[in-house]
DNA sequence: TTGAAAGCTAACGTGAACGTTAACTTTGAG
DNA sequence: CTCAAAGTTAACGTTCACGTTAGCTTTCAA
C-alpha cells in the first residue's frame, strides 16, 4: 500500500453529483490545492473520501454564503486542515508544553475565522434591520389607509 | 432646465473615491443600468447626486456582503427604485383603490428581499454556531490539560 | 471478455467585472 | 485666458471560475 486510504471510495462523478458541481470543478479545485482526492485507483482515477466530499461542500458554502473567492477559501480550508492536524497530533503527543502550544494555535485560527464571520453577520443584520423597518412603514401606510376609509 | 437636477454636484472622480471604486466601475454600472448620474454638466461630464452615491455604496454592500452578482443586484436596485416611485406616487394619487394596489406591490417587493436576506442570515448563523462549538471544544481541551497538570 | 460509460490530460473558450490604453474634450484654479 | 488635471468614448486586455472539446485510457456490469 503506497497511498489510497481505505475510505477513498467515491468516483469523481459521484462526488460531483453529491456536491452539485461539475467534474471539471473538482479537478479545478485540485489544481488550486483546495481539495485533493484521498487516493487513486490502480489505473489513476481519483478516489474521494467522505472527508473530501465534506470539504467540497464546505467550499461551496463559503463561496455562495459569504461570497469568498477561492483564494480566500484556500486560506480558510488550510486553517481548518491545520486544526485537524492539531487534533491528531494532540492525541499522539505526550508533552504538556507542546499541547499547550497546539491549543494556542488552534484557538488563534478559530478565533480569526469567527471574527470574520461575525463581521459579516453583523453587517447582514444591519441590512435586515433596514428591510424590517421598511416593512413596518409599509404596514403603517396600509393601516392609515384603512382608517381613512372607515371615517 | 432640461435635466441636471440641483443636487447633482459630484464629479465622477469624487464619487469613485467616496465609494472606493474606480471611475471605470462607475461607467460600467451605468452601462448596466445600475446607477446613472442625476445630471450632466454643459460639456457632458457626469454629475452625481447624494442619492447616486448612496446607490453605489448600496451596490458595493450587496456585492461584498452577500455576494450577489450585478445582475441580481440590478433587480434589487430596480425594486428599491420602484419602492421610491411608489412612495411619491402615493402622495400624489388620491384614489384609495390605487393606493391599496401600490401598498400591495411595495409589500411584495420588500418581502421578497427580506426572505432572501433571512435565508442568508440563517445559514450564516449555522455556520457561526459551528465555529462557536469548536471554540468551546478548544477551551475544554485547555481546561482538561490544566486539570491534568495539577493532579 | 467486451464495450458503453466514465475518467484522464491538455488545451482552448467564455461570461462577469472590471483594468488599461488611446485619442480627444471639458473643467476650473490661478 | 491658460493649461494641467480630470473627464469622455471606444476598444482591447485581464483575471477568476469554470465550460467545452479532443483524443485517449480505465472501469465495471453483462
Image (spheres, coloured by chain):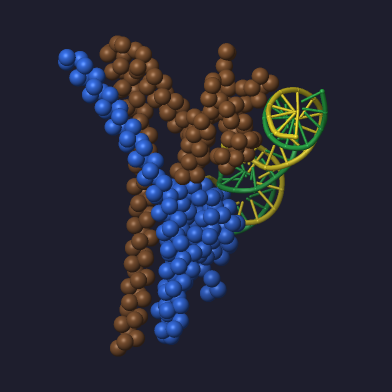
Chain colours: A blue, B brown, C yellow, D green
Residue B110, image x and y in percent?
A: 35, 31
Name the foreground residue: B99 vs A12.
B99
Q: Does residue A95 appear in this view? A: yes
Q: Is residue B26 left or right of residue B86?
A: right
What is the residue that sits farthest to the bottom in this orientation? Answer: B151
Residue D8, placed above or below residue B101: below
Residue B27, image x and y in percent?
A: 62, 31
Residue B117, placed above or below residue A73: above
Q: Is residue A61 left or right of residue B29?
A: left
Residue B12, image x and y in percent?
A: 62, 32
Q: Quadrant of residue A130?
A: top left
Q: Does residue A84 appear in this view? A: no
Residue B21, placed above or below residue A33: above
Residue A30, image x and y in percent?
A: 57, 57
Name the foreground residue: B58 vs B46.
B46
Q: Quadrant of residue B147?
A: bottom left
Residue at the image position 48 percent from the left and 36 percent from the top: B58
Residue at the image position 42 percent from the left and 79 percent from the top: A100
Name the foreground residue: A17 vs B81.
B81
Residue at the image position 44 percent from the left and 83 percent from the top: A97
Residue at the image position 49 percent from the left and 64 percent from the top: A79
Quarter holding the C terminus of chain A?
top left
Amino acid at each position: 500500500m503506497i497511498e489510497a486510504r481505505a475510505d477513498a471510495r467515491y468516483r469523481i462523478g459521484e462526488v460531483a453529483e453529491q456536491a452539485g458541481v461539475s467534474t471539471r470543478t473538482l479537478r479545478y479545485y485540485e489544481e488550486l490545492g483546495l481539495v485533493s482526492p484521498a487516493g487513486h485507483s490502480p489505473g489513476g482515477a481519483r478516489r474521494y473520501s467522505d472527508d473530501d466530499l465534506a470539504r467540497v461542500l464546505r467550499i461551496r458554502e463559503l463561496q455562495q454564503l459569504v461570497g469568498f473567492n477561492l483564494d480566500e477559501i484556500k486560506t480558510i480550508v488550510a486553517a481548518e486542515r491545520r486544526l485537524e492536524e492539531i487534533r491528531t497530533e494532540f492525541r499522539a503527543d505526550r508533552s504538556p508544553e507542546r499541547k499547550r502550544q497546539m491549543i494556542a494555535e488552534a484557538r488563534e485560527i478559530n478565533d480569526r475565522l469567527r471574527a470574520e464571520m461575525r463581521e459579516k453577520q453583523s453587517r447582514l443584520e444591519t441590512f435586515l434591520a433596514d428591510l424590517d423597518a421598511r416593512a413596518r412603514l409599509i404596514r403603517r401606510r396600509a393601516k392609515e389607509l384603512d382608517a381613512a376609509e372607515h371615517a
